[in-house]
Image: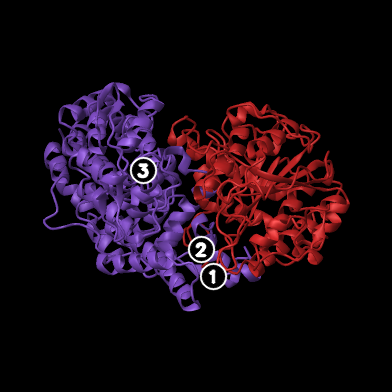
Amino acid sequence: MDRRSFLRNTGFVAAGSLFVPAFMKPLEAMALDELSLYKNLVVVQLSGGNDGLNTVVPYGNDIYYQKRKGIAIKPEQIIKLNDMQGLNPNMAALQEIHDQGWMTVINDVGYPNPDRSHFRSMDIWQTGSESNQFLSTGWIGRYLDSNCQTCKYPYTAIEVDDSLSLAMKGQTKKGIALKDPAALYRNTNDPFFKAMLQNDKEHLDEDNLGYLYKTMIETSSSANYIQNTSKVYQNKAVYPQSGFANQLKTVSKFISSGLKTRVYYVSLSGFDTHVNQIQQQGNLLKQYSEGMAAFLKDLKTNNKLEDTLVVTFSEFGRRVEQNASNGTDHGTANNMFIFGGRLKKQGIFNAAPNLGDLDTGDLKYQLDFRQVYGTILDKWLDVNNADILNKKFNTLDFI
Amino acid sequence: MSANDNFYKVKHLYNRAGFGISYNDLHKLSRKNLNKVVDGLFKEPKQNDEITLIDSVASKQQLLMQAGLYAKKDLTDEEKKQRQEIVSMQNEKSRDLNIAWVEKMINTEHPLLEKMTLFWHGHFACRSNNPMFAQQLNNIQRNNALGSFKTLLVEVSKSPAMLQYLNNQQNRKGKPNENFARELMELFTLGRGNYSEQDIKESARSFTGWMYDKDGSFIFRPNLHDAGTKTFFGKTGNFDGENIIDIILDKPETAEFISRKVYKFFVNDNPNETHIKELANHFFNSKYNIAELMKKMFTSDWFYSPENIGSKIKSPAEFLVGLSREFYVTYNKPQVLIQLQSSLGQYLFNPPNVAGWPGGQSWIDSSSLMLRMRIPSLVLNDGEIDFSGKADPEDEAVIAQSRIATVNANTKIKPKSYVDAKADWPKFLSTLPKGIKPVELAEFLLQPKLNEKIKGMIGDNKGLKSTSVELTSMPEYQLC
């Protein structure tokens, strides 16, 4: 008995054609070139609060060495980006990316009245809210809701994971989470699932039952579209062996096969390094950098790097001074990485964190994270950022 | 009123006021007068119904020890280890507490009490990494679930879990922290737009000195309390926290805010302002007696009107508890209940923020719906789990220290796993009438009205067990 089939032991036979309700255009029938000039956004979330100061190290500042006697990285080990900052040695794979001009580091990104709870701060970053405001929709979700020309379809935003992050949930539209397109395809093509959707003309109301059926139909359509579009593409590039690299490999497959998706979301977890940080963070940064380098080179080979923008964030940075356990505790502002083939300003974007001017031991932010979102929304996703972020944010010049 | 008519009403009542009902109970209750059935829901437990999993004496000792270790600057290796052990023990106990409550909901003989506790759990949403605090707050919410809203509000406000979560511990004379005062009005009582920033400032001053001591009991510290005069909603006086709560309760907006939230939780996502007004007046006039509010709602005709039946999306807790209750499921590895809650988006004791879970359609996206439709076969039919879900952000420190994260983060190649639960089929089947037809079983298990498609799908009799698995895997089963 197949324990992975929907119901294991039912006598359902494969159903005939699906009934697609009138309010949904059959996705499969869409002309492939209806949307041209496809620009992709890849959001990378580092969960746990990555220590930005040991990621992009301010080696030119003595205060860094004074405050971090047990965990500071020696100047000679650092991959220098300018005479103040350089990369953690575990990020060697990104040197080439940097030298190609495919990388920008934005320093000191944060928000007013920062929250040090992982959950709350992650919420704030994912929803784009103020720190005393509780939103139940994410910033990508509201982009989907905005109904722009390029965000009509449920597969407009794909998270390569088992469950969907708040960032991807809008009021009326939500992204789709899938780790493996083949597995989702198998589930939505299960005889029971198909039978549920067959000839179903009764459930087209706007009520909750209608919403459930609409979600099922969209899932099924998306699963077919994603699987059928991406399965023909053979990825020849070599990626390192890690879960994170696998997620990026899936994204590359989707982008390179021409999927009409605009936003991809992936995450790497384990950055809450309160104890013995050096080795743990080093391993994670190595996975991050090697995965990212392979991904970007793969996109370059497929002529997709120009159409792709990658943004990396973490819910907060860490305190400037290390703790007694050779780790670091929850802090505030942090750096963000931007990658892509069409960056306007490459390398270090703005001044390094000022370690001499702290707010009770924490970095003061120079840029609001919603300025980064706003820039991406305005200049890359072609929507007005005020419609998504509830007020207008000034854009930056990295793209 | 015909017995058949009553059958659907009682079924609806038990789906909303509780977590479903067995067929034979339903059959029995359908013969009674509906008002009597409603009264029966309010029967109080004979003895103390608290969760007593976490031993308070041992926890207090641990708390003291922990405080001592945190105060120290240079810890020996031994002490560092001790500190880590306390943290991991607390995490384990927090998980045990979660499971204890879910199992209590599954097995309780007082379903309304647990349902109402679940409502207050979301209303007074709070996270605490101290399992004793979390248990205490949960018991406050249960003990007062159907009692006086004022008592409930005061006790919640004085609970260490809430004092800690909303930073009242840092709210001191001369250096007020407004977090608690703001959420008290925005989320717990009046709702947005019914107070000014000045009201927040003044009430925050009134709550200065409300703290908990080092063994986890509420304490009022007069020397940290701002005893000056405050002006709050036009009244001036030397107010303390309880005075503020009284003034808030004098405002009918509070009764309306709570009634609207209760309506949306128990009746319909789309508020009907006329019905809400009715409830709010009754609640206000009964001096915030919660049982009165609930009785009024359950005995109103509109509660049983077609647009309110089978039209609400079950929360993950309602879905999991309901399924487990219906089929008398025992979980051999109860930790799986935590995995399921977190994959479905409602990890109890871990609300997304102080506003609680948004509910309604936000429970459903493509992956959560696919998972919900798969769970009955995982639980009732021993299917294979092919999802792993995301880590809770608060567990990141544990992930950071685990070998898996260090060696190969996010590679979740695991051996095949199963829910490892057992449904008591003989017991379930024995509650059903002899010779029950698949369509009758569907009318019992599903809340929305049956349509021809479902009748067709279950028409060929495959046996009650298979039919049950099919029915509970349908989108219609997601509604109550």
> Do marks 2 and 1 both belong to one polypeptide chain?
yes
Q: Nearer the viewer, mark 2 or mark 3?
A: 3
Residue B9 x, y percent position in the rendering: 23, 38
Q: Let me know if marks 3 and 1 both belong to one chain.
A: yes
Q: CA distance from mark 3 to mark 1?
A: 54 Å
Question: Residue B385 shows which numbered tag?
Answer: 2
The residue located at (34%, 33%) in the rendering is B185
- State the scheme by which the image is colored: by chain
What is the quadrant of residue A32 in the picture? top right
- Residue B166 in the image: state x and y as whole percent: 39, 45
Instruction: Give the quarter of the figure containing the C terminus of chain B.
Output: top left
Q: Chain of mark 1?
A: B
Q: Which residue is mark 3?
A: B172
| Residue that label 1 marks | B416
Q: Chain of mark 3?
A: B
Farthest bottom residue in view: B78
Q: Colour of chain B?
A: purple
Q: State the residue in front, A348 or B18.
A: A348
What is the CA distance from the residue labelled 2 to the residue labelled 3?
50 Å
Three-letter code for the amino acid on which mark 3 is drawn: Arg
Query: Of the residues under marks 2 and 3, which one precedes in the sequence?
Result: 3
Residue A105 visible at all = yes
Assess disc 3: are there few (<14), some (14-19) or many (≥20) residues with their C-alpha within 10 Å of its C-alpha: many
Q: Position of residue A174 (x, y in %)?
A: 57, 39
